[in-house]
Amino acid sequence: MPDAAVVERDVRPARCVIAAVFIAHALLFSTWPAHIPEVKSRLGISDGELGTILLAVPIGSIVAIAIMPILLRYASSRALVRLCLIGDCVAGPVVGLARSPVVLFAALLLWGVFQGSLNVSMNTQAVVVERAAAKPVVAWLHGLWSLGTVAGAALGTFGVRVGWSVTTQLGLLSIVVLLVVVFPLRALLSDTESEPKNIPGKFTLSWRILALGVSAFAAMLCEGAVADWAAVYLRTNVHVKSGHAGLGFTAFAAAMVVVRLVSGRLTTRWGARNLVTALAAGATLGLIGGLASANLVGTLIGLALLGFGVGIVMPNAITSVGRLRAGRGVAIVSAFGWAGFLVGPPVIGGLAGALTLPAALIVLPVMTALIGVTTWAAMV
């Protein structure tokens, strides 16, 4: 193994560039929701039609989930990160050009393909960088992604307030990303820094990979659900003032960012398997208690514990499967996680419509309990 000085000199540029990719992905993705009401009004579509149209993004991501593990068998994650990031930057502004519901669905479908593909390829490259650095990197990158989503949401809100269209805002943001991020991508590492993966017939979809994929799916389902439904729950069921409704997601997101940014030291000391399992158990008990309390303080504590509980599941699942098999295995776990993030909000919405929102949110502690079981069984 090369000495630490050589590793640091070789890996630092790649680590900085892949960090920029994670932030860019988050910014592009999270700027869009603030513009949805304007697009809905401009096209004159109903709530039901909008719900159907917005399914295009997860459908596109499912397409990416199907094709990316195959593509990563024949192409490097470095090349695919470049291709998918460019596609993400081009497809985003096109969404605002849609002049009919059908065209909007098609544009979102294409954007969803590139979003999902970039998510898978950048996580695959993150494992390559982590293995070359010989120290935790993936959780730190996911912490930056979380910060990027908060910044993107703020940018989207600002853009709406100053009257920018979604095409204008995403177009300007995409130009910045292309200029700042795409050209330095040559600093990313070859996948052979991790382990060879283009050997026909060698890859096996083991039970460990599937279990880690389930963990990633469950964790990201919680993240997506809280992002869309925490404020609604606090406003309509806990009856807080409208100005306090956003505190739920704030508590959750802040806890998640903190645990991701400090998880390197924690996992080194306690071990990823023990740490993730313990945090998941705490999240399960904390969120059940928070929902049962039906008051602001209890709910915020429960959501914060949920943030701690799910924050490092996805990055540690990716790291763990990377030890088993880089490339296609990492791609599969990344795809599971991204799918969970996208389906979380509609799952909670559907259950809330059939039952009640508090009853629907019971899904979240069920997911964290599942994380504890699958992590303890499969994480290495």
Image (cartoon, helix red, strand yellow):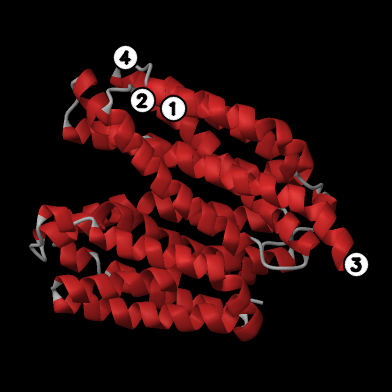
Going from N to C along the chain, the mark reached first, 1 or 4, is: 4
The reply, left or right, for residue 28 in relation to residue 348 is right
Which residue type does callout 3 highlight? Asp
Q: Residue furthest right?
A: 2
Whole-percent x and y of residue 239? 7, 62
Judge whether 355 appears above or below 198 on screen.
below
Q: Are marks 4 and 3 in contact (CB under 8 Å)?
A: no
Q: Quadrant of residue 255?
A: bottom left
Q: Dot 2, crowdedness within 10 Å: few (<14), some or many (≥20)? A: many
Residue 170, numbered label: 1
* Residue 161 visible at all: yes
Going from N to C along the chain, the mark reached first, 1 or 3, is: 3
Which residue type does callout 2 highlight? Val
Q: Quadrant of the C terminus?
A: bottom right
Dot 3: element? loop
The residue mark sitting in front, 1 or 4, is 1
Q: Label 2: which residue?
A: 166
Judge whether 304 appears above or below 241 on screen.
below
Q: Label 4: which residue?
A: 99
Q: Are marks 2 and 3 in contact (CB under 8 Å)?
A: no
The residue mark sitting in front, 4 or 3, is 3
For the residues labelled 2 and 1, the Cα–Cα distance comes to 6 Å
Q: Label 3: which residue?
A: 3
Going from N to C along the chain, the mark reached first, 4 or 3, is: 3
For the residues labelled 1 and 4, the Cα–Cα distance comes to 17 Å
